[in-house]
Amino acid sequence: MSAEPQDRTFTNVADGNARVGFQAQEVHIEGGYHVSDDDPPERQFEVGLRYLEISAPTEARELIRKAIARGYQNSRADFYLALALLSGRTLQSLTDQELAQLAHVRRSAAQRSEDPWARGINAVGSLLDSLPQTTAETPDPAAIGVVVKEFESLTPPLQESILNHLEVFLAGPHQDWTWQRTFAAARRDRTAKDRVERVWKFFQPKPIPPREVPPPPIRTDAADFLRASGGSALFLVASLWVVYCAWSHSWLRSAGYLTVALGAVVVVARTGFIIKLAQHRRWVARQRLTFTPQRAPTQSDRFASAMDSLFDRYFRRYLPQDMAREAWLAETAGIRQSLRNELIELYREQAVDARRVAWLVRFLASDVKRRWLSGELKADPENSRVPSSTRAAFGTAVFALVVTGPLLLWQAFVEAPITTVIATVGVVAGARLAVRGWHATLFEHHRYQDDLVRVWQDYEDRCSAYDRWVRKLESKPTDEEMAHWLDCDRKILVQDTLRHYRLSAQDVIAHAFIEAPMPGCKRARVSRGPWRYSRYKLLLFLLTKDGVRQVTVTLDFETTGFGDQQRLTYQYNSVVAAHVVDARNGEKKLSLTLTNNPRDELTITGEWPGMPELGDDDRIASQVSLDASGLERTLHVLEGIAAEGKEWITHENRREHAGLRRLVAAMEG
């Protein structure tokens, strides 16, 4: 659905030395307006039509003309070319070439009168024909009735397209019924298609998919292997020598002691490892929760700072009920820092926007809260629980070893005292080296396996969260919907202002808009499309024969709510000067000075203070934003008032009537 063009401005407004800043910005590649000269004419036409629907007629005219010139010739293309030529224009600004194109379009439509698009062109021609071409001319009610009937015979989409793009029909004899239709449609469509539930999604960046976290590699070296193998060999040789000496003294008793001791050693080694591994797993879990590691080094301080802000924001938001925020942050300091470092290592590329990872930070914060509430966060890991039977077996085996070990050593000592002492030292030293070596090797192996399981589970959970977020963003509004909703907001403001001042549609000679982003708002756009903002500052100028009504109001675009309103009424002769700067880069600035408030100066700019150097896509977006804003129309009105005062109304009517006569004459062939 199209939006009324000439009163929209996506430009900054700053009073004095004010600065405009943005909380977030996003450029959506998908759904953009990319087109090239090599694309087929059908594609050029469709992109041109999309530009027209967002009220960027300059780009629309160029693309639709190219498509027609390359062979895309039909009544649908002619209809939208006519709208693009007239959209947001004053009649006096039409060139002879454009008048010739309109004449050709109307002649072609006359030959296809049954085609719905051709009927739309004929209705546009009839509406133009019915407009008074001189100040003294009086409209014929019967002729107007015929035109209205012809217009109402069109399909609703064609009616809305004509009303939204041809501002000239909001004046003259058709003013009452066109404004009534326009306001009714704005009331109907302003919150249509679940606007409040969907608008916020337009400002969300495309999320980056989750990435697998590589677990720390196994950290064992040659020294650990030498300790394990050398200690085991020493322990085995020394133990065999003790057994040999004891066997030589009394083989029968030694056999009994040896059998019990060997069994006890095997049980102690097995159950002791299980118990120690469980303790190690509990220690690791607690370290992750309570230990605050050093900040991970990063290649991008900006990215690291943004990640800090995201973690702080979402952990402050997702906290257990009835728990102080500072206490919660202290409780989760360790795990929060670990997760922060983990994500910085995963997404540390310079080109990555931290906002694209915000969904993951939000999920992690909510997941930590969930695990804390369920007790899982502080509970021992499942694989760290040791059965009581294992502990009993360990205690029994230790007792058996304590009893039989000394008896076996005594048997050997009686047979060979010195040799037994040396062998015993070897047993103790070998056991110590073997335990240290095998502890490092086996524990590290199990740690790596545990990390693999944890990493895979975390990755699956994050993939599920990512899929849920992507599905939620699938209903993100299109740029055309954003443009139409904003246009509806504008029209509602016009209607409310008319009611406040108790004005009728016929009391309004002209109206103009300036729209600017509020400081700190979110902003986003599709590729090569105009910027859209989450909060606007709207300035409405209503021109009547008695003077100018200027209304300033803030708009929360996500909730559709209007904020505080300021109203200013002044005579035409109160406008002292309108200073316009038209820069080569597309930037436009206006300073409007009034006699009753000389400090009330308005600055309009197509860019914002301190913005970085523009790329090609940014330049196109800036030009389209100014085109879609209808700023040219607004400047035309304000400059005319500043130069001519109240006489501007008379002069403008004369100029428009002359332009209308040229247009009607051309379209009649």
Image: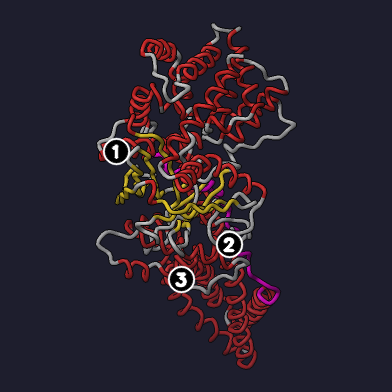
Given this view, does label 3 or label 2 mark the residue nearer the observer?
A: 3
Q: Is residue 555 left or right of residue 603?
A: left
Q: Residue 187 location in percent, x, y?
A: 33, 31
Q: Which mark is residue 287?
A: 3
Disc 1 residue crowd, few under 14, some 14–19, many 20+, Cα 10 Å? few
Given this view, does label 1 or label 2 mark the residue nearer the observer?
A: 1
Q: Amino acid at mark 2?
A: Tyr
First of labels 3, 2 by sequence position? 3
Q: Secondary structure at mark 3?
A: helix
Q: Is residue 231 above or below residue 25?
A: below
Whether 216 is among the magenta residues is: yes
The residue that appears at 64% across and 81% down in the rendered structure is 238
Give the magenta range: 197-224
Q: Amino acid at mark 3?
A: Gln
Q: Which mark is residue 75?
A: none
Quadrant in which residue 63 is drawn:
top right
First of labels 1, 2 by sequence position? 2
Residue located beneath label 1 in the image: 496
First of labels 3, 1 by sequence position? 3
Q: Residue 582 location in percent, x, y?
A: 59, 51
SS assignment for the magenta stretch, majority: loop
Q: Secondary structure at mark 2?
A: helix
Any part of residue 615 in sight: yes
Q: Which mark is residue 448?
A: 2
**Mark 1 and mark 2: span between their CA atoms?**
67 Å
Given this view, does label 3 or label 1 mark the residue nearer the observer?
A: 1
Q: Residue 543 location in percent, x, y?
A: 38, 39
Disc 2 residue crowd, few under 14, some 14–19, many 20+, Cα 10 Å? some
